[in-house]
Amino acid sequence: MSPDRPAVGDLFRRFRERLAAGEPGGHGPKAGATGANGSRATGAGAGVARTDAGTVEAGLAPQPPGDVPPAERRRGRRRGGGGERLAVPPAEFTSYYGRPILKAPVWRWDVAAYLFTGGLAAGSSLLAAGGQLTARPALRRAGRVTSLAAVTASAYFLVHDLGKPSRFHHMLRVAKVTSPMSVGTWILTTFGPAAGLAAVAEAAPRLPERGLLGLGRKLLPPAGNAAGLVAAVTAPALATYTGVLLADTAVPSWHEAYPELPVIFAGSALASGAGVGLLAAPTGQAGPARRLAVAGAALELWGAHRVETRLGLLSEPYATGTAGKLLRAGRALTAAGVVGALVGRRSRVLSGLSGGALLAASVCTRFGIFHGGIVSAKDPKYTVVPQRERAGRRESQGPDVNGPGAGPNGG
């Protein structure tokens, strides 16, 4: 170091003196910086370096210390405390080139029909099992035949949506418990043959008593009874897995309604099965169908009320437009069907009308849920607003003091 050069301590001391005197070399308050905005310590203009004393004199909010975490700064701004204000306003509900944020499902009406026929098959098999266990042959026969017809139609709609029949076969190559589609494929594969054998067994009395067909006449009834019980055991999974399948997608109004959709679909399946019994069976044998109608209506109406009131903004697609009209019609038809089933215990006509109302209600409910989800996927606000609300709740809760990284060493 040169002996003529002053020491560092002397330089620092001179700097502080110039700073106190307001000289330009000390970067202190300058003559040009004390206009309408006052000094840099108390000014409100751009580039002001605020201090606690200066901000109090100017009536401004104090600047939080630099060691305050960002999350605390954001919470301070929300509570009206200090910190910088956001210079960029929140983004609107738009996307690039006007395209939706989510790609709406390409499913057509055949998927909604698949949802209905699958539930009808499940409900009818439960109705048939009830007729079998309580010795009501007309109720058992109606349930078995309807179950076979419905599961056949359900398989057709599914294959039609897949485009190629071989794709259904390819899904049977693996069994993936975490995939609702894979589980549903296996459920349908188990339920279909059982329902088919139970329905074929109803033709046993028409076979001749001798020869090979006579042997079939003896063996089919017990085999049909066993198959009918297998189908009834599988029916609850068949009725509810489609609700899990919809909730497993990214469609906002389906995904958020994951607790209610299986309940709605289970109730709709029971109500549709009850409708078959009220239509086809004599009034003396329709007791299980009436009880099934009450149970199904209770589940369906409770679930439909929940999705229209619990989801906040995501309930809107279920209450407006085509979906809202269908769901309101479904509720009205369900209530009318249950009342008619209970009142018309001895009226064949009234029981038949009640059964038709329950079947129509199931159709309206399935199609209403389907259309509501499609609408929520097309409008960006149903994706953006719930995401912002969830992010805001996480920020307001703050970091978990007992979670990872909460210790003094971050462990």
Image: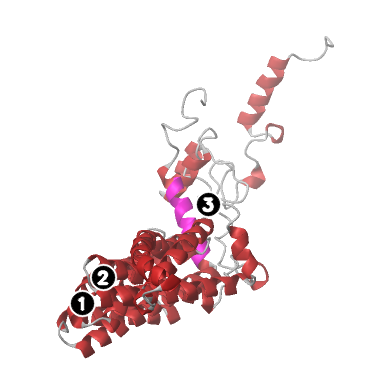
Instruction: Look at 37% across and 71% down and name the residue there.
Output: 217
Q: Is residue 389 magenta?
A: yes
Tag 3: amino acid: Arg
Q: Nearer the viewer, residue 230 or 377?
A: 230
Residue 207 lies, in percent from the top left, at: 39, 77
In three-dimensional space, the C-alpha distance between marks 2 and 1, rounded to whole angstroms, equals: 8 Å
- Depth check, mark 3 against mark 2: the one in front is 2
Q: Tag 2: Cα neighbours inside 10 Å, few (<14), some, or many (≥20)?
A: many
Q: Which residue is mark 2?
A: 131
The relative height of residue 72 versus residue 168 in the rendered view (above or below) is: above
Q: Which residue is mark 3?
A: 85
Q: Which residue is mark 1?
A: 285
Q: Nearer the viewer, residue 205 or 338?
A: 205
The relative height of residue 401 versus residue 106 in the rendered view (above or below) is: above
SS type, badge 1: helix
SS type, badge 3: loop
